Image (cartoon, rainbow, N blue to C red):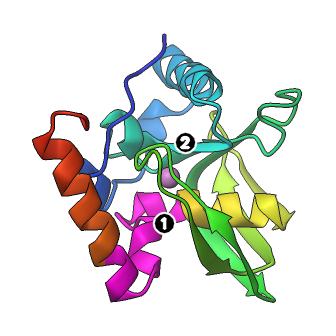
Amino acid sequence: MIYKIVRYGNPVLEERCDPIGEAEFGTEELKQLVADMFDTMYAAKGVGLAAPQIGLKKRLTVIDPTSGEKQGERIVLINPEILSKEGKITEEEGCLSIPGFREPVSRAKKTRVKAQDAHGNWFELEGEDLLSRAIQHENDHLDGVLFIHRLSPLKRDLIRRKIRRLQKAGEWD
Ligand code: NI
């Protein structure tokens, strides 16, 4: 099933998400949710998607840095915790919940994260460049932080004003 992606303005995007509980690991519901999140992300041509973007306040994200090319690297991060960050790189970044807007955002070049898989097993992953950026961007979503929160107040307000105009025109839902 492909979910409708929640857009900026919906409060669920700016709330802190709750951890996935032990009872949910290994269930058909969780496996189906993960599969649906990948389907939704691929349909939208994104490289990452976090549960709040489909309206769920859960600490769950899916990432595929090869999305658009081969859809070959399915990464599921549940209850992720960033262990370390290294270096800095500034690249244009966007978000499926803020379509049409891309801005340069500084992120760590390398990120090490630990997370649980859909069965509850903990693992560690190190990402560099695009994967590092995706891990940080998706992890931010779970704390209610969007990439526009990482821009200067001036740029952020400019984007907010443009979005408000789109909302008034009925072109943002
Ligand atoms: Ni996003």
| Residue at 43 percent of width and 34 percent of height | 23
Q: Residue 96, how many percent across, how many down?
A: 49, 43
Q: Residue 157, how many percent across, how many down?
A: 27, 76
Q: Is residue 171 above or below residue 150?
A: above
Residue 125 falls left or right of residue 1: right
Residue 135, quarter of picture: bottom right
Is residue 101 or residue 142 the one in the foreground?
A: 101
Disc with the residue nearer the chain's start (1 vs 2): 2
Q: Disc 1 to disc 2, how far (Cα)?
A: 11 Å
Q: Is residue 20 above or below residue 90?
A: above
Q: Residue 63, how many percent across, how many down?
A: 68, 43
Mark 2 residue's CB less than 8 Å from ligand 1: yes
Q: Which residues are magenta?
A: 139-156
| Quadrant in which the C terminus is drawn | top left
Of all residues, the one furthest to the left in this rendering is 168
Residue 6 falls left or right of residue 137: left
Question: Is residue 33 something that shows in the picture?
Answer: yes
Three-letter residue code for mark 2 = Leu
